[in-house]
Image (spheres, rainbow, N blue to C red):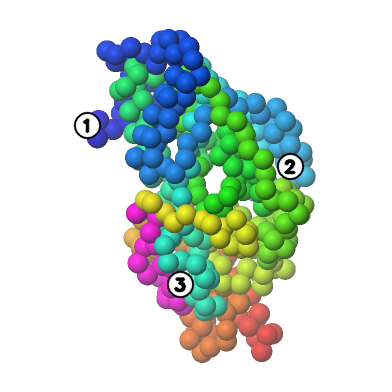
């Protein structure tokens, strides 16, 4: 790319072009066929960038905002105070980009090739989305390149790229655009499963909206039944406070003692509800190499990961989404997994080596792991 998207579009800046502007082209395109042709052109550019689908949405979020308010009132968001702090913004994309008229919501598949069955109990189980490069960077860069392509072809453009990094109801928006339907586990789902990321490009262009699709979960409750901690408290309702993804990633303090045995050897995130979903039998593998598992991470021995120094953690997790939880929480999670692992002298020794760790959080979980293992014996 001759000039980075961040330089050309930072803060929604307008790029001046010599060609006829997109808005003028929209007015000139009187027939549905002409506007659909423009949309298909943009979809083709998205496909060239590794996106597997792209939809156009004129979101209406009043109903979703009311559901969010009820969810927050139940306290289901736990420590995620930002969910409540930015609740109003989530229902108004124009607050994120003044003048925004259309949201382009894109899908990028991330299922790593060759990663199907969970690893053995003495090996680290890491959510599949986190085995490769941090998706925020990959999707944002490619959305900005898509914005650059649109501006180069059609003229001045105001835009903002979002990749789970702004208060936006992305699943609801994707549903409204027909990218899929909301599964009972609350994730976006379609006939090729749910192993994909979402990214959004807010633009000040008037583009016709794509229609939604019907849901196809029927009477199936596989995702609800599979949740190890019972976090899916009702169809389409998740109590994050019990969710293993929340507990191992977002939660900063001690993991509730009653939930620790239920974590098993999951040390970062949880895929159980997605693994159980019948639609994921038809999931498409990742097309972008960024999501290939980094060497030595998938199925790594728990004791090997637990032995990392802070410097090793920082170096080995550079560019990984796992890095954001920090070394202390990483050790916390691993201590719980080691407490749940099969009894071996090597695991006992690994835990005892961290028994006097400077972090009170780590020490408490190591002590629990040693006691839990002793009680199991």
Question: In the displayed structure, would residue 145 be above or below residue 275?
Answer: above
Residue 66 is one of the magenta-drawn residues: no
Indicate whether 320 appears above or below 178: below
Q: Residues within 10 Å of mark 1 (few under 14, many from 20)?
A: few
Disc 1 versus disc 2: distance between alpha carbons? 45 Å
Q: Quadrant of the C terminus?
A: bottom right
Q: Which mark is residue 2?
A: 1
Residue at image point 66% right, 80% down? 372
Using residue 194 as the reference point, say whether residue 219 is left or right of it: right
Q: Mark 2 = which residue?
A: 71
- Magenta residues, start to end: 289-311
Q: Position of residue 51 (x, y in %)?
A: 42, 42
The image position of residue 9, as x and y in percent, is 36, 26
Q: Quadrant of the N terminus?
A: top left
Dot 1 or dot 3: first in sequence order is 1
Expressed as whole percent of the image width and height from the top left, the position of residue 96 reads 52, 26
Answer with the quarter of the image where residue 361 lies: bottom right
Asked if residue 373 can be seen in this view, the reply is yes
- For label 2, count other residues whose C-alpha is less than 10 Å away and answer few (under 14), some (14-19) or many (20+): some
Q: Which mark is residue 312?
A: none
SS assignment at label 1 = loop
The foreground one among 126 and 336 is 126
Q: Secondary structure at mark 3?
A: loop
Q: Gap in Å between the C-alphas at discs 3 and 2?
A: 35 Å
Residue drawn at point x = 47 percent, y = 40 percent: 53
Q: Is residue 129 above or below residue 358?
A: above
Q: Residue drawn at (22%, 31%), measured in percent from left and top? A: 2
Mark carried by residue 299: 3
Residue 55 screen position, x and y as percent:
51, 33
């Amino acid at each position: 790319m001759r000039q980075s998207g961040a330089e050309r579009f930072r803060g929604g800046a307008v790029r001046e072009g010599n060609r006829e502007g997109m808005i003028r082209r929209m007015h000139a395109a009187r027939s549905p066929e002409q506007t659909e042709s423009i949309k298909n052109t943009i979809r083709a550019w998205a496909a060239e960038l590794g996106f597997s689908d792209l939809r156009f949405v004129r979101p209406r979020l009043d109903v979703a905002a009311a559901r969010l308010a009820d969810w927050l009132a139940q306290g289901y968001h736990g420590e995620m105070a930002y969910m409540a702090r930015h609740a109003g913004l989530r229902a108004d994309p124009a607050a994120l980009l003044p003048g925004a008229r259309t949201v382009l919501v894109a899908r990028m598949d991330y299922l790593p090739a060759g990663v199907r069955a969970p690893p053995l109990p003495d090996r680290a189980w890491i959510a599949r989305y986190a085995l490769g490069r941090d998706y925020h960077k990959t999707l944002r860069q490619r959305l900005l390149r898509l914005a650059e392509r649109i501006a180069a072809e059609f003229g001045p453009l105001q835009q903002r790229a979002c990749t789970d990094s702004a208060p936006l109801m992305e699943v609801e928006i994707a549903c409204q655009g027909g990218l899929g339907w909301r599964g009972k586990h609350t994730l976006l789902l379609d006939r090729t499963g749910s192993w994909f990321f979402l990214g959004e490009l807010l633009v000040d262009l008037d583009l016709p909206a794509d229609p939604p699709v019907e849901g196809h979960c029927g009477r199936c409750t596989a995702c609800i039944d599979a949740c190890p901690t019972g976090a899916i408290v009702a169809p389409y309702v998740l109590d994050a406070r019990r969710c293993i993804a929340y507990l191992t990633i977002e939660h900063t303090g001690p993991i509730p003692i009653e939930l620790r045995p239920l974590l098993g050897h999951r040390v970062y995130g949880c895929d159980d509800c997605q693994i159980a979903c019948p639609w994921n039998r038809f999931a498409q593998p990742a097309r972008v190499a960024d999501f290939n598992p980094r060497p030595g991470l998938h199925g790594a021995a728990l004791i090997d990961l637990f032995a990392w120094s802070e410097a090793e953690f920082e170096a080995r997790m550079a560019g990984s989404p796992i890095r954001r939880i920090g070394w202390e929480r990483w050790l916390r999670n691993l201590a719980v997994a080691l407490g749940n692992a099969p009894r071996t002298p090597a695991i006992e020794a690994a835990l005892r080596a961290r028994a006097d760790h400077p972090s009170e959080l780590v020490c408490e979980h190591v002590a629990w792991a040693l006691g839990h293992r002793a009680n199991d014996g």
